[in-house]
Image (cartoon, rainbow, N blue to C red):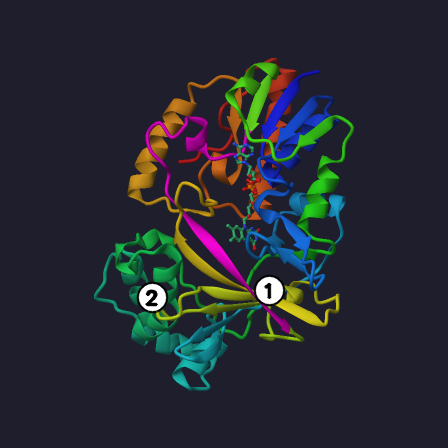
């Protein structure tokens, strides 16, 4: 039996820890926050009793049946379809951009083919190979849709002009030529009946797993374990030796009210002159519950400083150069595996996080069976 230390109690570590505990290993998890579940943490708001997602709204969606079965093993998922609205120039629109959005924006009642023709006529074909986000959007959708839904929102989200962001951010034509407003195109979609924290708690509920909350990692812990699984920031492991990897952070401003405050779970605000990016009303994430009161969170995006919570990895050229330095150094480390969104400096949806964690656990079990050393990375960050 090996003894493993897991740093972080989010989905990445919870899944790998559970799998290795079931394989007969001893697991200690330390978490610097006073709670488990990482950024997926949910709790009942004391005043309203509504389940709120403390680090931003989380909707579960996947095409991966193994992941779907896995999460359902640890908690009840109820059907939930995310339908997002957008405010642009004081008018409300359907998202993601679909036939309804096009007809709303152009004040038309076009059929799918007519809408396709319209958008094709708007596309700026003079841009042969788009290099920036702005060029990519203008090339695909034209100026009206770009200005209404992308320009201001992207500027607020990333704090950078869209003309300075790489084209790769907007990979494909983000338009549906039908009235499908289901935000995610995945087969399985849902919300945990009792919140994400309960699901992670069920994963960690195993006789071979011990969890210590409010316990940050310290270097002295290293000698007490056979191996460490690190889901903290990759650069933090090296004490930021080469500098800090860039992140965006979020601030959430609560607003309380009675009844239904905005009529939908998520409304995006696309204009540059509105300082927040979206407002989420969390009671709508659990439509099977009834609450007299309500609570909304206005979400603001800004640069992540040293004492802020890192949310979205920026991954621009400067960050990728730094990342390369850390990854090269990490490959020389012994007895540590870097996992999860912070450990590999990538944005990962929950389903991808769980899939990768299951893959890591499978690979670790195979390495143990073959008496091989465990690797620093099972998923390449670059
Ligand atoms: C705003 C936002 C919205 C999102 N919405 C969705 C969504 O709708 N659907 C979806 O599928 N995914 C969503 N995600 C992605 C989801 O949050 C991630 O997939 C998930 O959190 C990744 O889990 P993790 O365990 O890798 O990382 P985390 O959840 O970040 O867990 C890492 C843990 O490690 C701890 N830690 C770090 N350093 C130390 C240390 N030195 N000592 C001890 N503990 C430490 C941290 O405190 C943290 O709890 C969203 C992400 C963001 C930012």
Residue 177 falls inside the magenta stretch: no
200 or 113: nearer the viewer: 200
Report if residue 188 is visible in the image. Answer: no
The residue sitting at 60% across, 28% down in the picture is 6
Q: Circle 2 sits in a helix, a strand or a loop, which is it?
A: helix
Q: In which quarter of the image is residue 327?
A: top left
The residue sitting at 26% across, 55% down in the picture is 164
> Where 307 sits versus 155, above or below?
above
For the N terminus, the quadrant is top right
Left or right of 332 on screen, residue 293:
right
For the C terminus, the quadrant is top left
The region drawn magenta spans 230-257
Q: Find the residue positioned furthest to the bottom.
A: 108
Picture coordinates of residue 302, whole percent (x, y): 39, 54
Which residue, given by chain and number where applicable, does mark 1 sit on?
82
Q: Circle 1 sits in a helix, a strand or a loop, which is it?
A: loop
Picture coordinates of residue 289, whole percent (x, y): 75, 66
Picture coordinates of residue 354, whole percent (x, y): 61, 41
Which residue, given by chain and number where applicable, does mark 2 sit on?
151
330 or 186: nearer the viewer: 330
Q: Is mark 1 within 8 Å of ligand 1?
A: yes
Residue 242: numbered disc: none
Whether residues under marks 1 and 2 lie with C-beta atoms below 8 angstroms apart, the answer is no
Picture coordinates of residue 214, whole percent (x, y): 61, 35
Left or right of 30 on screen, residue 299:
left
**Label 1 crowd bin: few (<14), some (14–19), many (20+), radius 10 Å:** many
> Where 69 sits versus 215, above or below?
below
Report the Cα–Cα distance between label 1 and label 2.
23 Å
The residue sitting at 50% across, 70% down in the picture is 95
> Where 377 sits versus 171, above or below?
above
Left or right of 76 on screen, residue 226:
left
């Amino acid at each position: 039996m090996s003894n493993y230390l897991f740093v972080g109690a989010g989905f990445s570590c919870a899944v790998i820890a559970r799998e290795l505990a079931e394989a007969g290993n001893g697991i200690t998890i330390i978490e610097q926050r006073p709670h488990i579940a990482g950024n997926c943490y949910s709790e009942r708001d004391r005043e309203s009793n509504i389940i709120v997602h403390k680090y931003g709204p989380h909707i579960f969606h996947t095409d991966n049946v193994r992941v779907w079965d896995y999460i359902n093993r640890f908690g009840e998922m109820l059907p939930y379809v995310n339908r997002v609205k957008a405010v642009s120039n004081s008018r409300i629109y359907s998202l993601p951009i679909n036939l309804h959005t096009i007809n709303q924006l152009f004040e038309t009642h076009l059929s799918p083919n007519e809408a396709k023709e319209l958008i094709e006529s708007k596309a700026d074909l003079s841009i042969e190979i788009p290099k920036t986000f702005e060029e990519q959007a203008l090339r695909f959708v034209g100026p009206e849709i770009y200005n209404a839904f992308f320009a201001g929102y992207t500027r607020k989200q990333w704090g950078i002009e869209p003309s300075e962001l790489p084209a790769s951010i907007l990979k494909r034509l983000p338009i549906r030529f039908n009235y499908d407003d289901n935000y995610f195109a995945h087969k399985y979609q849902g919300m945990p009946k009792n919140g994400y924290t309960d699901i992670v708690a069920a994963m960690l509920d195993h006789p071979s797993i011990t969890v210590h909350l409010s316990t940050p990692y310290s270097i002295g812990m290293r000698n007490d374990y056979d191996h460490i699984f690190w889901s903290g920031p990759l650069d933090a492991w090296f004490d930021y030796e080469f500098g800090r990897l860039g992140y965006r952070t979020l601030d959430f401003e609560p607003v309380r009210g009675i009844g239904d405050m905005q009529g939908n779970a998520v409304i995006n605000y696309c204009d540059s002159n509105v300082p927040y990016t979206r407002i989420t009303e969390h009671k709508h994430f659990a439509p099977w519950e009834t609450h007299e009161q309500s609570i909304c969170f206005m979400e603001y995006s800004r640069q992540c400083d040293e004492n802020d919570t890192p949310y979205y990895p920026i991954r621009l050229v400067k960050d990728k150069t730094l990342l390369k330095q850390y990854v090269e150094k990490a490959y020389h480390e012994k007895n540590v595996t870097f996992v999860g969104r912070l450990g590999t400096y990538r944005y990962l949806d929950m389903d991808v996080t769980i899939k990768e964690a299951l893959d890591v656990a499978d690979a670790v079990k195979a390495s143990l069976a073959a008496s091989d050393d465990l690797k620093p990375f099972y998923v390449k960050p670059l």
